[in-house]
């Protein structure tokens, strides 16, 4: 198979971890006889520094021209405490999602048995837990009208959804539920919000088309509580952009570390595959970032955008093997991990390649 992949490292540890992700893609190409070509593009803070724009036109053109995108992270601490900044790295990310029509964000919470102890939740509550989130990604309060009024002393954002937006993400979730345990949980706040009542209405209307899928509705507050109390009760979950943002960060703790979680953003055009961990400037350049989320993002890319299941599974098996051999990056190590098993980013990448 011949494919063109765009590497968009972005900010912070994005560069370090996508380097390993790309090495893994290269090894897969070699091993399975594919031909992957690559290009690179800027986004986020590094793009602002270079061009003044967090999503330069050149990047967008390259994105549209590629078969899939391996993405790092965006963000820089200098903006976090400056609410007045007009140009922000995150604007690049949000515009990319909108421009590429990436309305479905898949966040699998996959728990490797070896990391049961790394979670702050008790192993007996976690064991066997496997969740697939479908977070709507191009609507909601993220893209609704917002404004300052009253000389800047009042502000509002608009939580807004249209029927077609709920329907298309819900269909993806229903279809995924069919291939898993046939259970779908929809999360909203329909006891308060009108946009959530529309959300629930759309899900209820679709449900008869998927009679084999059992649908459960939960309010976001209850879902957040249940996720900690009884994570195994979750299988496929569909929710809006903001609720999904919050709930998936919470869910990442089930997997022990954000450093382990990959995501896929898909929709109308090129799919984007990225770790959910963000730019992590506190550890940037120290060579200690966990590259496994980027590696697992590469696995999702091969599976979802290229339909290369065996290749994707080979990567997951290699991650499993490295963890079974006891290797850990700092974020997933504990007090019992022997010092010689604690690896930096590149060394972890090298161990992984040995297993591929
Ligand atoms: C995520 C991130 C982004 C979001 C930020 C960086 C804008 O938290 O991808 O979950 O809120 O969507
Ligand atoms: Mg988030």
Image (cartoon, helix red, strand yellow):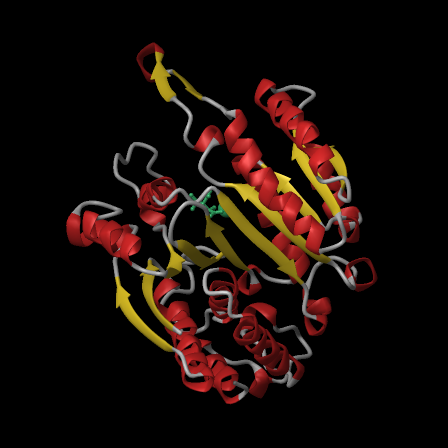
* Total numbered badges shown on the rendered structure: 0
Taking the spot 68% from the left edge, 64% from the top edge, the residue there is 111
In the rendered image, the residue lying farthest to the front is: 209
The quarter of the image holding the N terminus is: bottom left
Of 135 and 245, which appears nearest the observer? Answer: 135
> Looking at the picture, how far across and down is residue 289, in whole percent?
46, 69
In the image, residue 352 above or below residue 92: below
- Nearer to us in this view, 45 or 58: 58
Q: Residue at x 47, y 78 (%)?
A: 344
Q: Quadrant of residue 151?
A: top left
**Above or below — where is 46 with respect to 293?**
above
Reply above or below: 241 against 41.
above
Q: Give the farthest residue toward the top.
A: 150
Would residue 63 be visible to someone looking at this image?
Answer: yes
Q: Residue 246 in the image: x percent, y percent?
A: 57, 42
**Residue beneath the point at 52% across and 37% down:** 241
Q: Kindly identify the residue that appears in the image at 27 percent across and 57 percent down.
A: 65
Q: Nearer the viewer, residue 102 or 319?
A: 102
Which picture quadrant has residue 240?
Answer: top right
Q: Nearer the viewer, residue 105 or 19?
A: 105
User: Residue 338: x, y in percent?
Assistant: 63, 85
Residue 276 visible in the snapshot:
no
Q: In the shown orientation, is residue 235 left or right of residue 326?
A: right
Q: Is residue 223 above or below residue 3?
A: above
x, y percentage for residue 176?
64, 51
Q: Residue extending furthest left?
A: 51
């Amino acid at each position: 198979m011949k494919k063109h992949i765009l590497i968009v490292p972005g900010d912070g540890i994005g560069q370090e971890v996508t380097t390993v992700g790309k090495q893994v893609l290269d090894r897969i190409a070699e091993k399975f006889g594919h031909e992957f070509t690559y290009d690179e593009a800027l986004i986020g803070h590094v793009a602002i520094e270079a061009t003044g724009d967090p999503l330069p036109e050149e990047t967008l053109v390259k994105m549209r021209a590629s078969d899939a995108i391996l993405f790092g992270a965006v963000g820089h601490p200098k903006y976090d405490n400056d609410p007045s900044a007009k140009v922000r790295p995150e604007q690049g990310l949000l515009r990319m999602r909108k421009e590429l029509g990436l309305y479905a964000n898949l966040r699998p919470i996959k728990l490797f048995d070896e990391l049961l102890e790394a979670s702050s939740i008790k192993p007996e509550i976690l064991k066997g837990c496997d969740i697939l989130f479908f977070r709507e990604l191009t609507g909601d309060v993220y893209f609704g009208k917002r404004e300052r009024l009253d000389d800047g002393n009042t502000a509002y954002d608009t939580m807004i959804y249209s029927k077609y937006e709920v329907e298309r993400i819900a269909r993806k979730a229903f279809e995924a539920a069919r291939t898993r345990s046939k259970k779908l949980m929809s999360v909203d706040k329909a006891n308060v919000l009108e946009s959530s009542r529309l959300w629930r209405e759309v899900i209820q209307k679709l449900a008869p088309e998927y009679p084999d899928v059992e649908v459960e509705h939960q309010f976001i507050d209850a879902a957040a509580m249940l996720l900690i109390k009884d994570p195994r009760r979750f299988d496929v979950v569909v929710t809006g952009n903001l609720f999904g943002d919050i709930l998936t960060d919470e869910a990442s703790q089930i997997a022990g570390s954000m450093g382990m979680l990959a995501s896929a953003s898909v929709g109308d055009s090129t799919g984007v595959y990225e770790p959910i961990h963000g730019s992590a400037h506190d550890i940037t350049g120290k060579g200690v970032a966990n590259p496994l989320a980027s590696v697992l993002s590469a696995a999702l890319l091969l599976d979802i955008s290229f339909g290369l299941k065996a290749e994707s599974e080979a990567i997951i098996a290699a991650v499993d093997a490295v963890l079974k051999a006891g290797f850990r990056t700092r974020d997933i190590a504990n007090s019992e991990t022997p010092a010689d098993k604690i690896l930096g980013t590149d060394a972890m990448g090298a161990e992984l390649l040995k297993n591929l």
